[in-house]
Image (cartoon, helix red, strand yellow):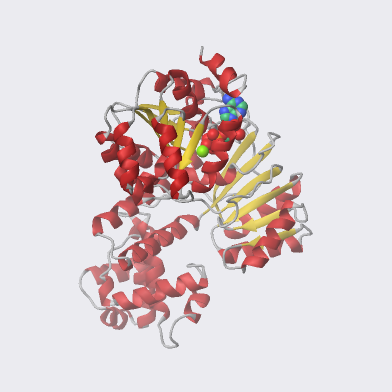
Amino acid sequence: MLQEHLQEYFKFDTFKPGQEEIIQSIVNGNDTVAILPTGGGKSLCYQLPGLISNKLTLVVSPLIALMKDQVDALNARGISSTFINSSIETRDMDERMQDVRDRSVQILYVAPERFASDRFLRLLSEIDIGLFAVDEAHCISQWGHDFRPDYRVLPDQISQLKNRPTVAAFTATATPEVKQDIIDRLTLLEPHVYVRGFDRPNLHFFAQSSMKPKARMHEVLRLVQSMQGSGIVYTLTRKETEVVAEFLKENDITATAYHAGMDKEKRSNVQNQFMENEFKVIVATVAFGMGVDKADIRFVIHAGMPGSIEGYYQEAGRAGRDGEKAYCILLHGGKDNGMHSWFSLKSQDDMVRQGKAPHEIADMVSMRKRQFETMKQYLESQCRRRMILSYFNDKAVNELPENCASCDICLNYQWKTSVLPRERRDRKTSSDKLSDTIGETAQMYQAGSSVEDIASMRSLGVSTIMNHLIRWYAEGGELELEQFITREEEQMVLTAMAKSDDYTRLTPIKEHLPEDFSWEKIRLVIAKIQRIFLG
Ligand code: ADP
Ligand code: MG
């Protein structure tokens, strides 16, 4: 039935994964949330129902630049549609509104700021809307990557309409937080939620955990040498893009670095050269990728763990757009967890400076933690593809065979490199595991002795004792931080870390601090960062 309408209006023979059930849900009059990846065909899901029922569809979209294209494409198919946004002259706008009143328009696109216009609100009060479609619905959530306060007026507007239309929300962002936020904020009524289309059968997933920096770099080289075609290597810091690119070049791989610290012209040159296959490998931070439309990327290697599955899948998914076999390889390093603690600490600091409320900051921190946990689950998963599809709640997981035959676990792939046994850290017993001498210092500290007292009692230097305490603290011991470093000094160290683009190497951090700034204070802040994700 629906398929005939698809043919009639769009001349397509088959639905893309998920489209049919989403359209059916809307046609049945259910509020609906549809999560499909970019390119999954969301537009058609709100375009078709109104054509079938012959009622007006109102589409809210933030993408003014794309409205004209969409409307032109629809009109070219003989589907009468129009848009009203700030790019339209007043006279033209009046005409378009009249067309809507006359029902000679079937699909009307508007940007959310339109709801601030009295004339538009008057129009809304006069017409009957069958479907109220909210495109890019993650914009209503501050957890989304593109929060737009304009979207927050939509629920009020919907409730003021003469007859409440069916409301449908569309996005490619599938975090549980964003999905729930969309439902709550739009006040959807018992919505039917559909998630489909995340499966990419031509992608092969590999993951390896807890690698040491050097071993990881060699593994990147080995992998790159063993694979055909060109690809991306993602690192967590700008510095690493340069180090890894240099290392690959020394080993006769055509490679280049790319990060946001490079000037605009350089970046666009590098990107163009990569598009034209002048480099086998581009080593980049996440600054690279948006809008890069190279279909034949054969591999995406992460030499650094991303902060969330969404982020990982978006980046890894740049491989194999042409549908040919491609590899998505995650090489997690022992240092990555601390790196993310640091990123989290930096955002906390930014939020404090922006005057955000404590509960907002706490929410952000716990969200990042939760998302990072899911990445750890990915590393430990028994099938990478199954883990990804279940994470996104994609129904395709039910159709997946026991053995997906396209991840390292299911393929029983034997990693060549030796890997550190994973350390389990336990806060309570951590001091037992430290050497006796540190334990002794820690005990004396806990008993109330000052650093100087401990030093003289143990006939050791003050700096040695300080180092003991820092090691102990890094492993989870309790230390009165304020005794050793002020809030301002901590701030200075964080700023210096941001400038040196790494939190693990002391010397570059020290270079951005006053001459007499002590090494211990830098170490203390690093220890604090390492602790955050332990707890
Ligand atoms: P999204 O908004 O989910 O990123 P779009 O709605 O822009 O995706 O659709 C992406 C492309 O897929 C468009 O060119 C659209 O015409 C095409 N498309 C949508 N549905 C189908 C279908 N059933 N069969 C073939 N092509 C389709
Ligand atoms: Mg879209």
User: Residue 285: which quarter of the image?
Assistant: bottom right
* Residue 137 % position (x, y): 40, 40
Residue furthest to the bottom in view is 516
Q: 339 or 443: nearer the eye?
A: 339
- Residue in the picture at 36% in, 65% down: 350
Number of numbered tags placed on the structure image: 0
Question: Residue 517 in the image: x percent, y percent?
Answer: 40, 84
Ligand 1 falls in which quarter? top right
The answer to whether any part of residue 319 appears in the image is yes
The answer to whether 48 is drawn above or below residue 359 in the figure is: above
Q: Please give left or right for residue 492 compared with residue 512 in the image.
A: left
In the drawing, does residue 96 fall left or right of residue 459? Answer: right
- Residue 17: x and y, percent? 54, 25
Within the image, what quadrant is residue 174 found in? top left
Q: Is residue 343 above or below residue 323?
A: below
In the foreground, 128 or 188: 128
Rendered residue at 76%/60% (across/down): 251
> Relative to 233, is 308 on the left or the right?
left
The part of the image, by quadrant, that contains residue 108 is top left
